[in-house]
Amino acid sequence: MYFALGLMFVGIFVGRLFLKVAKISVSALLMAVICLLLFILGLELGYNDNLISKFASIGAASSVIALSAIFGSCVAAKVLYSYILKNPSGESAELGYGGKVDVSQNSTVRQYENSDGHNGGGAWSGTIMIIGAFAAGLVLAMFDLMPYGQELAGCSKIVLYLLMFLVGMNLGLDPAIVSTIKAQPKRVLFLPFFTMLGTFAGAVAAYAFLALLGGGISLLDTLSVSSGFGYYSLSSIFLNEARGAELGTIALAANIIRELLTILLAPYMVKLFGKFAPISSGGATSMDTTLPIIQKSCGNRFVPLSIYHGIVVDFSVPFFLTLFLSLH
């Protein structure tokens, strides 16, 4: 994970060297590699016989927990986002991202809302491409229709490394990136903690809903699954060892769903909840796998915040897992 971050900084350096390179070519390549990563993720899931065989029984619980965590995170992110936009006093220069804020004309809001993300008419086409890539990988793996599919499924880290390099290069091609990083508002540093609160509020709601349906998952188990924050490999291993294979599989599926839906729905999260929402929804993955789509949907100025958010949330995962498991 931190090697991937290192590659991003190499990409920034390369981008600064080739500042005059047409940015659209990098953006197009970014989208292609995002689709490739989702295709490989589809392959990985399709080849996971344990997950596929149990999905009918665990799918409902996993989906409810994931959707509740996403919604709770987005609402919490919206609260912080709205507060910062409506209370710019004392942070005028910071909130303007390199320029002074004319509060009387509400330019803070314009600076945020008119950032360099791409949330226009291309959102649907990008989403369709991503869904298509994931579905193709899933179907090809489930029916064993792809030669060397198993080998390709094992290349996800390589593709992720390429993706992070391209994210860095895209940042390096932005001449305003240095002033953007310097101008991060201090209050955005609270975003990871809003993500945690929103996720756990969503987990409580998910538990209540599943209890009404007669689900057998306890509140502590629901909180444990949610505390993966999209970090499905660690959370599923923890819970598989401590609470059994079924809860481990629920954690795996719920956190994969959280990551996938963040990638698929990021542009719409921005429209409904503001530009902190995809970062919050991505949880621990906002520093790597969901970072490219966050950059594409929110703009370059939100990349430093996304990385910081991912690091803080990532470090919190083993802490919360240990805490909730110790309460059993």
Image (cartoon, rainbow, N blue to C red):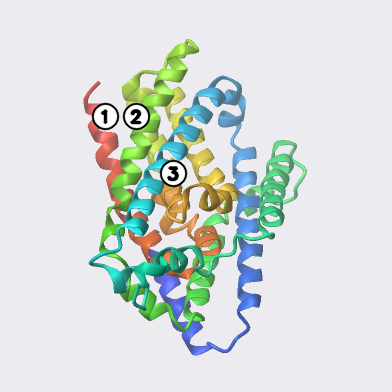
Q: Which quarter of the rendered picture does the C terminus lie within? A: top left
Label 3 Cα crowd, 10 Å radius (few <14 / some 14-19 / many 20+): many
Residue sitting at x 46%, y 39%: 70
Mark-to-mark CA distance, 1 and 2: 7 Å
> Which of the two residues, 51 or 117, is positioned nearer the viewer here?
117
Q: Which amino acid does label 3 sit on?
A: Cys
Q: Residue 89: image x %, image y %?
A: 26, 64
Q: Can residue 5 be seen in this view?
A: no
In contact (CB < 8 Å): disc 3 and disc 1: no
> Which of the two residues, 155 or 311, is positioned nearer the viewer here?
311
Mark 1 vs mark 2, foreground winner is 2
Q: What residue type is labelled 2?
A: Leu
* 223 on left or right of 170: left
Looking at marks 3 and 2 on the same chain, the residue that comes earlier in the sequence is marked by 3
Q: What element carries label 2?
A: helix
Q: Looking at the image, is 114 positioned above or below residue 235? A: below
Q: Residue 30: image x %, image y %?
A: 60, 67
Mark 3 vs mark 2, foreground winner is 3
Looking at marks 3 and 1 on the same chain, the residue that comes earlier in the sequence is marked by 3
Mark-to-mark CA distance, 3 and 1: 23 Å
Where is residue 222, by image quadrant? top left
Q: Is mark 3 on a helix, strand or loop?
A: helix
Q: Residue 74 carries which label?
A: 3
> Which of the two residues, 245 or 293, is positioned nearer the viewer here?
293
Q: Residue 67: image x %, image y %?
A: 50, 34
Q: Which mark is residue 324?
A: 1
Q: Which quarter of the rendered picture does the N terminus lie within? A: bottom left
Q: Name the residue under label 2.
A: 223
In contact (CB < 8 Å): disc 3 and disc 2: no
